Image: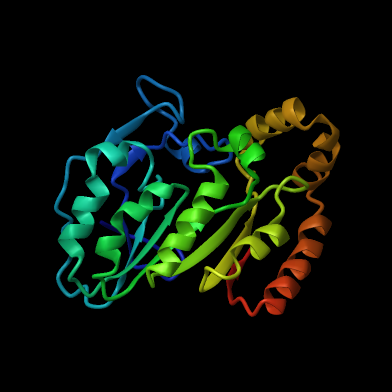
Amino acid sequence: MTKTNIGDHDYTCNPFIGCTHGCVYCYAKTIERHHPVNEWGQYVDIKKYLNLSIPKGTGKKSLFFSSMTDPYQPIENEVKSVRKILENIVESDLSISILTKSELVVRDIDLFTQMKNVEVGFSISLSDVDSKIFEPGSSSPSSRISALKQLHLAGIKTYVFVSPIIPYISNPLEIIRQVKDDIDYMMFDSLNLSNEENRSDFLNIIKKNYPNQFDKFEEIFIHKNRAYYNKLKNDIINTCHQYNIPIHNIY
């Protein structure tokens, strides 16, 4: 558990190094790019600790799973590292926030219902078809929505983070309509291609899979034209207002 400045969280827990979801837009792949054997998306190293050390005086501070990996990626089904950590803190005063792209998270509903303050969120920004291109190792968006419904029915606080919004491919307004009855709030973020390596790799994927959209992507990410995102932001705010959905963050 390490200190973090992500959102309103005080600490973050990354039980793994690497992630086999293989999301092509992930910022972590440029931070953790020097792996001795495999390329990003093809490896996951399991950290050895099982008992999370809670600093003295932590009180009612918050803990986020996870900032540099997905806590419920496929390996978790086998090793149960996250579950063991949660079992260790189930009675603590920590506020727990989980963000994942995996339906596996429903496995731990029994623990979530015992916690004093926990929320579970899903990152959803694509259709099932497009997800196979951009996040090939993750659960399908439709299965994430099904898992979201299960958590909501269990009385657990839930949210959806529509991120990254990929221009002309993501449909955030449709996602709002799909999840509106099963969430407590939503967040939204644009696609960040500020890293040159990420930008080059991503634009090559667009050129290969969406050649008719390539010029539009160059306009946004090379020439820095924000008109698309500015208009979409207004549409998102209006749609969330229509359904009385709180927005905790947008771009």
Residue 45: horizontal and vertical position, in percent? 29, 33
Q: Nearer the viewer, residue 189 or 223?
A: 189
* Residue beneath the point at 55% across and 38% down: 135
Asked if residue 38 lies left or right of residue 218, the reply is: left
* Residue beneath the point at 50% across and 54% down: 146
In the depicted structure, whether residue 176 falls above or below residue 146: below
Residue 195: horizontal and vertical position, in percent? 60, 41
Work out which quarter of the rendered image holds the C terminus and state it: bottom right
* Residue beneath the point at 70% across and 28% down: 204
Q: Is residue 197 visible?
A: no
Asked if residue 90 lies left or right of residue 112, the reply is: left
Residue 57: horizontal and vertical position, in percent? 17, 75
Q: Nearer the viewer, residue 244 or 225?
A: 244
Q: Is residue 114 visible?
A: yes
Asked if residue 29 lies left or right of residue 221, the reply is: left
| Residue found farthest to the top | 37
Count of numbered tags: 0
Q: Nearer the viewer, residue 59 or 245?
A: 245
* Model colouring: rainbow
In the depicted structure, whether residue 135 falls above or below residue 233: above
Work out which quarter of the rendered image holds the N terminus and state it: bottom left
Residue 15: horizontal and vertical position, in percent? 28, 46
